[in-house]
Image: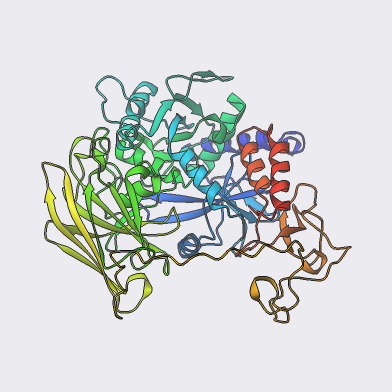
Amino acid sequence: MKCIRVCSPKVFLSILLMLQSFRLGRGQEVPSIPPTTLDETCLAVVKDIFSEDRKELLCQTPSGMFYIIPSVNNRWIDENMLSGELISGEVFMDIPFDTRVERETQTLVMTEPPKLLYYQNPSRRLHRQLSRTTGDKTVLVVRVSASNSDVSIDERDLSKSVFGGSNDFVNLKSQFTACSHGKLNFQKRTDMNGLTTNIRDGVVTIRVNMPVQVGSNTIVNEVSRTIEEEFGTTVDGIASHVMYCLPEGALSGVGYAIMNGVLSVYNNELCTSVSTQMHEVGHNLNLGHSGMGSDEYGDQTGVMGYSYKSSETPKMCFNAAKLFQLRWFDDKSVSYTPGQNSWVFNRSFTLASVVDYPTTRSFVLVEILQPNIRLNYYIGFNVAKEFNSGVKQAMNQVVVYEKPWIDGNDSWRVADLSQGHRHTISNFNGVAGDTLTIDVLSINQSAGEAQVRLELNRVGPPPTRPPTKPPTRMPTPRPTPRPTRTTPSPTRGVGGRNPNSIDKPTAPANPSCKRSMEACETTDDCCFGYSCRRISSDSSSDGFTNVCRTVAKNSKDKLPRTQLYWWKRRLRGDASAEMSQELADEAEDANGDEA
């Protein structure tokens, strides 16, 4: 009892884990670890567990800890990912700071699904996506040693299996460089000295004073704590991607990764499997699984399906849906929306393989949009050669995939087409009776090209063809000068709307109303064009406060962009740019551009 009074919680936890390790060896009952409470904000991240066909929703704290949210299941996660409400790594959760944490299982004690607080800004999300999937990125491999078990691969072989070396020619680094044609390159984390261990050749050994029987969740958090103690930075700040290699017995299955995150975790020697490495790091890049039929891993035209134990084979990349999301080949990719814009009757195009990307003048990826139902199709020519020579299925065929519009969702292979074959999409774009046909007119193996035609067949009459010669333009009348006054016309209202209608474009001025970021209780307290929102706040007792924010299209409960950027800088151990970003956010908010 004396130790409980004077020892820190971390020391007390270590003593209990030592006792646990000793008693496990003697077959005695495992002592329980006292629960604690959550005292940090929660970023929602999705943990995709390879080979178990399930996902978990985790709370990631700024200190790099992961806690399981037990009150949601696979269906809740999938539905919210499909709708765009849940984007791993970009969404906060409204969880009280005093929520209990069961440290034996690293689980938050919750009975209801958490409320998601998020922000939307497509242009910034695209910028972040490109910055994550292109350029030179660092990788750190962590060899974990438990008190009663060790990883069976030494540091030297782990380094070779990830970065290459003598007699290791196919690895994470070589395949990503080849598949992206140099757009994404992985490098070793530079050497660094810690307090008791050192990073060398991109690998470090971390020892934790606990047995493998405590489970992967507890071990992973303890490894992350140890890394911060050794090197003074969190896992998210030490490298672009961090791979934890756990000893046998700590993890069931192959491994798992944080989607749209930094961390991936592997079961012992599977840390050297090149297909497993690419699969898990693919999740870090926000790629979902590749399925076929009813099998979520059934598509073997890319590494986001099943993986293999070999450290050298198979040599394969990602399917067309994943490659389009990664945006490595934007200059030779095209998106079509059949039936809209300038689309008339059909389109034909030449399709080349991504392997020939540097030399071809043809498209290598084609996206077909269905804006009404937000389920898109992707077409690629799956040539089996060079760095894609080990592809397992649909070799040298034109392959069609479907994937929901939000990144991170699974793709599904729907057709493998040889020359003269056709695939028909019924009720295209949600219109009953409309069909879109995809015909492979020819395949030239020596040239590495396929001729493909898309044809939209409508239930109603086809659209009128454009005239061969454009009609003569009528003289354009001189525009009427814009009135200088800013008040709307009393007869028509703004935009020609009736000012007496319910949707009034103006509101009476209220000199006492609240503006951007001013405290409020209800929306009635805010000026016109603002609404009262609940956001995260460090100054309030419960971690949240209500402020007036600019009304945005399709607005929901959103956080200021500043909050997310501050959170991620804090996770990386960098808060130097916080003030300038906050000022930029307020300036944007004042101009009506809500993040």
Residue drawn at (25%, 64%) of the image: 346
User: Residue 522: x and y, percent?
Assistant: 79, 67
User: Residue 551: x and y, percent?
Assistant: 68, 62
Residue drawn at (76%, 76%) of the image: 490
Residue 215 appears in the figure? no
Q: Is residue 294 left or right of residue 56?
A: left
Between residue 41 and residue 564, name the one nearer to us.
564
Query: Taking 504 as reference, is 97 above or below it?
Result: above
Residue situated furthest front in the rendering: 475
Based on the displayed image, in which of its 4 quarters is residue 185 positioned? top left
Based on the displayed image, in which of its 4 quarters is residue 415 positioned? bottom left
Residue drawn at (45%, 32%) of the image: 148
Q: Is residue 575 left or right of residue 467?
A: right
Between residue 57 and residue 379, name the one nearer to us.
379
User: Residue 517: x and y, percent?
Assistant: 77, 53
User: Residue 194: x and y, percent?
Assistant: 56, 20
Q: Is residue 320 left or right of residue 524?
A: left
Report the quarter where the N terminus lies.
top right
Query: Taking 364 as reference, is 467 above or below it?
Result: below
Query: Taking 526 as reference, is 174 above or below it?
Result: above
Residue drawn at (34%, 52%) of the image: 334
Residue 493 appears in the figure? yes
